[in-house]
Image: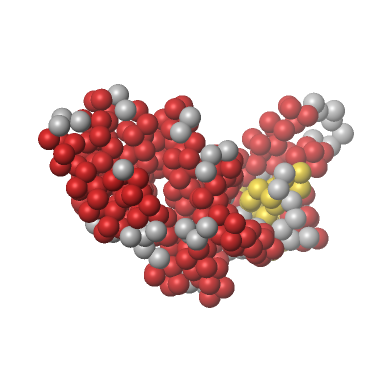
Amino acid sequence: MRAVCASTHYNAHRFEAARALLEQALEPLRAHADREGEALATVSLGVVALALDETSTAFALLDEGRALAGRLGLARWEAMALSYLAMIRHLGGDVARAALVYDESINALAALGVRRAEGLALFGRAMLRLETHALDGASDDLRDALANERVTSPDYEPLLAAALALIAAARDDVEARDHHLAFATRCVAQRGARFAREVAALEEALRRGDHGPLAACVTPEARLLRRGTAALAGYRAIPTLTVAEDRRWFSVGDGERQDIARRKALRLILGRLVDQHRASPGDGLDVEALIRAGWPGQRVLSAAGAARVYTAIATLRRLGLADLLERRGEGYALHPRTRVVAVP
């Protein structure tokens, strides 16, 4: 009963009250050697400490709870503790380690079918991917998280929809940003006020162009949104793409020329993307259009052609277009604010 009441207090942001109840519950659990109850209470106390921004205490409790859950075979709680440990590393700036722990927890939760907790871990990894300019992966994570929420408990839906607005903002897609924000606001009205503050603060932050409004939101999820909003500044400096008129080479910003003269498919696909960008910035070319562009006159089976396109896109990104070449809908496009300069 105390655990249920603590959860109610936590969801209402009454974190101190939640901690008091959990601490009251923990003592008798230990006295009666209820190791399973002790593991659950310890993990829960770690989550509350994280919400209170007591990082060291949160890490110690979550790691203790994870280890105890592991010894008892409580795989669900072990994986859930891992997801919050990933969040702590993420909030502390240890991006590389956080990515590994997010992956481990998501894989474990997916295998166990714990969809709601998996959705929260996917949200965390999406914010990390936003920070590292992996927008396609971030978008995929959030859509997977939404799918999980909709078949379990949809109270995280406003948060996930708001996070999709962040991804749209990074892509400079104002229409999609506003659509996701409007949907998040409708979700708040329908699902309750749990993430009302976060959604309203993120909307104001995106309108102002800084993460200040999120400072008043104290949940771990809000702190991840704040990091994501701060990361948007890195997306606003779009480098110039310089291309040869015959598309035999290109360079990005002050980078070296990339010679693709002998790579006909890359040259043709890049040329088609540049032409599309000039005609309609931000509008994507689907896979079929890129197959026709890269291998004109050839009869290519759809699956084989799609594989060729994916390989070509990955190669162009590796050669320097990672920050410019984006997935748009079912296709690909240069970032809409890319400045393209053609030279002889």
| In the foreground, 141 or 23 | 23
- Left or right: 68 as drawn, with respect to 207: left
Residue 112 to residue 212: above or below? above
Residue positioned 47% across, 58% down in the render: 194
Residue positioned 71% across, 58% down in the render: 282
Q: Where is residue 104 in the image (x, y as percent from the top left)?
A: 39, 34
Q: How is the image coloured?
A: secondary structure
| Figure quadrant of the C terminus | bottom right
Q: Residue furthest right?
A: 297
Q: Where is residue 181 in the image (x, y as percent from the top left)?
A: 61, 62
Residue positioned 45% across, 45% down in the render: 120
Residue 81 to residue 10: above or below? above
Q: Position of residue 73 (x, y in %)?
A: 30, 24
Residue positioned 35% across, 28% down in the render: 75
- Left or right: 138 as drawn, with respect to 304: left
Query: Does the image show residue 99?
Result: yes
- Left or right: 43 as drawn, with respect to 340: left
Q: Position of residue 313 (x, y in %)?
A: 65, 42
Query: Does the image show residue 165?
Result: no
Q: Which residue lies furthest to the left in this view?
A: 31
Q: Which residue lies furthest to the bottom in this view?
A: 208
| In the foreground, 310 or 182 | 182
| Figure quadrant of the N terminus | top left
Residue 142 to residue 252: above or below? above
Residue 343 to residue 328: above or below? below
Q: Which residue lies furthest to the front in this view?
A: 1
| In the foreground, 130 or 43 | 43
